[in-house]
C-alpha cells in the first residue's frame, strides 16, 4: 500500500487559499507482478468525505472508513476539507478539484476514470451530494479551469446525510456553510439538494437511522424521492436504531467505550454498500 498526502496546489493550483486547512490523503494499492495480470491493475476509487457540521471533519468518519474500502480493493482518497469560517463554495471547489485531479491522473494512480465514488457522512454527505448535483455549476469551471464533467462523481454513498435546508434542516450545518448569508433565501434554496436533483445526478446509496435526532431521517427520504422523480437509481436502507454519527457502527469507530455507537444492524451498511458498488462499477 502506498500512502501519500496531496497539497492543494498539487491538486489544482487555481484553488483559492482557504482560511482553514484542507488535507488530502491517498491510500493506493501498489502494482505488483505477483498479483493479477497487468490489464487488471486499474481499480475503482472512493473519495471519503467526513462530516462535522461544516465546522470540523470527524476522525471517526475518515481513516477508519478509508481502510474498509482499501481492504475491499478500492483506491481511496480522504478529503479533510476546509470548514468555517470558510464558506460555500470553498469545500465544493476542493472536492471538485480532487475528483478532476484523480481523473486527470488516472493512469498514474491506476484508477478507472469512469469509476470514482464519493462517500460522505452527515455534512460530508451534503458536500458529497453537492458534488453529484452541482457539478455543472459555472463557478467550478471558471475557478478551477476544468471541464465541469471532470468534477462529477460516478456514484454517491451518503451516510445519514444533511440534505435539506427546509423544514427538516440541520440548521447549524447551513449556518456554518453559509455564514452571514444563511438567511438569503435564494442561496439557501440553491444548496437544499432535494430541489436540485435531475437526470444527470449519479446513482446513490443512502443509509440513515429512524432514531437519528440530529439530522432527521426525512433528509434521506426527501433525497430518495427526488432521485426517484428524476429517474436516478438508488438504494436506501433505514435502520430502526442508532444515534447520529455512527460511522462504521462498530468497535473500530467507537469513542471511549460509548455503547450507543455500536449498532450491529446499522453496521451492515458497509457490506451492503460494497455489494452495491460492485454492481455499479462492474
Image (tube, rainbow, N blue to C red):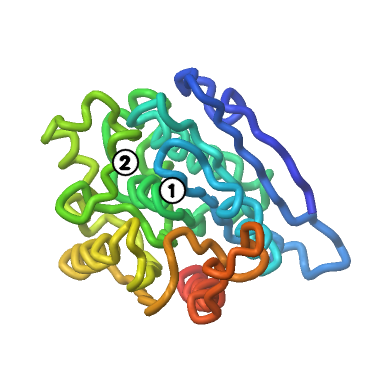
Picture coordinates of residue 3, whole percent (x, y): 75, 45
The residue indicated by pointer 1 is 124
Q: Quadrant of residue 258?
A: bottom right
> Looking at the picture, does residue 67 appear above or below residue 2?
below
* Residue depicted at x 29% and y 27%: 179
**Residue 275 appears in the figure:** no
Determine whether the residue tagged by mark 1 lies in a helix, strand or loop: helix
**Residue 168 appears in the figure:** yes
Q: Nearer the viewer, residue 11 or 212?
A: 212
Mark seen at residue 167: none
Picture coordinates of residue 54, whole percent (x, y): 41, 38
Q: Quadrant of residue 69?
A: bottom right
The residue indicated by pointer 2 is 172
Image quadrant occupied by the N terminus: bottom right
* Residue depicted at x 33% and y 46%: 130
Q: Quadrant of residue 93?
A: top left
Determine whether the residue tagged by mark 2 lies in a helix, strand or loop: helix
Picture coordinates of residue 59, whole percent (x, y): 60, 48
* Residue depicted at x 55% and y 31%: 22
Amino acid at each position: 500500500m502506498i500512502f501519500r498526502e496531496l497539497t492543494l496546489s498539487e491538486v489544482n493550483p487555481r484553488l483559492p487559499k482557504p482560511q482553514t486547512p484542507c488535507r488530502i490523503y491517498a491510500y493506493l494499492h501498489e502494482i505488483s507482478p505477483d498479483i493479477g495480470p497487468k490489464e487488471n491493475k486499474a481499480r475503482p476509487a472512493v473519495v471519503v468525505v467526513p462530516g462535522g457540521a461544516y465546522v470540523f471533519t470527524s476522525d471517526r468518519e475518515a481513516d477508519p472508513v478509508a481502510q474498509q474500502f482499501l481492504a475491499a480493493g478500492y483506491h481511496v482518497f480522504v478529503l479533510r476539507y476546509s470548514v468555517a469560517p470558510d464558506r460555500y463554495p470553498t469545500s465544493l471547489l476542493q472536492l471538485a478539484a480532487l475528483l478532476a485531479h484523480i481523473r486527470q491522473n488516472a493512469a498514474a494512480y491506476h484508477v478507472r476514470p469512469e469509476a470514482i465514488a464519493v462517500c460522505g457522512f452527515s455534512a460530508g454527505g451534503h458536500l458529497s451530494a453537492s458534488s453529484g448535483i452541482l457539478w455543472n455549476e459555472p463557478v467550478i469551471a471558471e475557478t478551477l479551469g476544468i471541464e465541469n464533467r471532470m468534477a462529477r462523481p460516478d456514484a454517491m454513498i451518503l451516510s445519514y446525510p444533511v440534505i435539506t435546508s427546509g423544514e427538516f434542516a440541520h440548521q447549524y450545518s447551513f449556518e456554518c456553510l453559509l455564514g452571514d448569508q444563511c438567511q438569503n433565501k435564494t442561496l439557501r434554496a440553491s444548496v437544499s439538494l432535494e430541489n436540485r436533483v435531475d437526470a444527470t445526478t449519479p446513482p446513490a446509496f443512502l443509509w440513515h437511522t429512524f432514531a437519528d435526532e440530529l439530522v432527521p431521517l426525512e433528509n434521506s427520504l426527501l433525497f430518495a424521492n427526488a432521485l426517484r422523480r428524476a429517474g436516478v437509481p438508488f438504494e436506501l436502507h433505514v435502520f430502526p436504531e442508532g444515534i447520529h454519527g455512527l460511522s462504521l457502527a462498530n468497535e473500530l469507530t467507537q469513542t471511549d467505550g460509548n455503547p450507543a455507537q455500536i449498532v450491529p444492524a446499522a453496521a451492515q451498511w458497509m457490506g451492503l454498500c460494497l455489494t452495491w458498488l460492485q454492481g455499479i462499477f462492474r
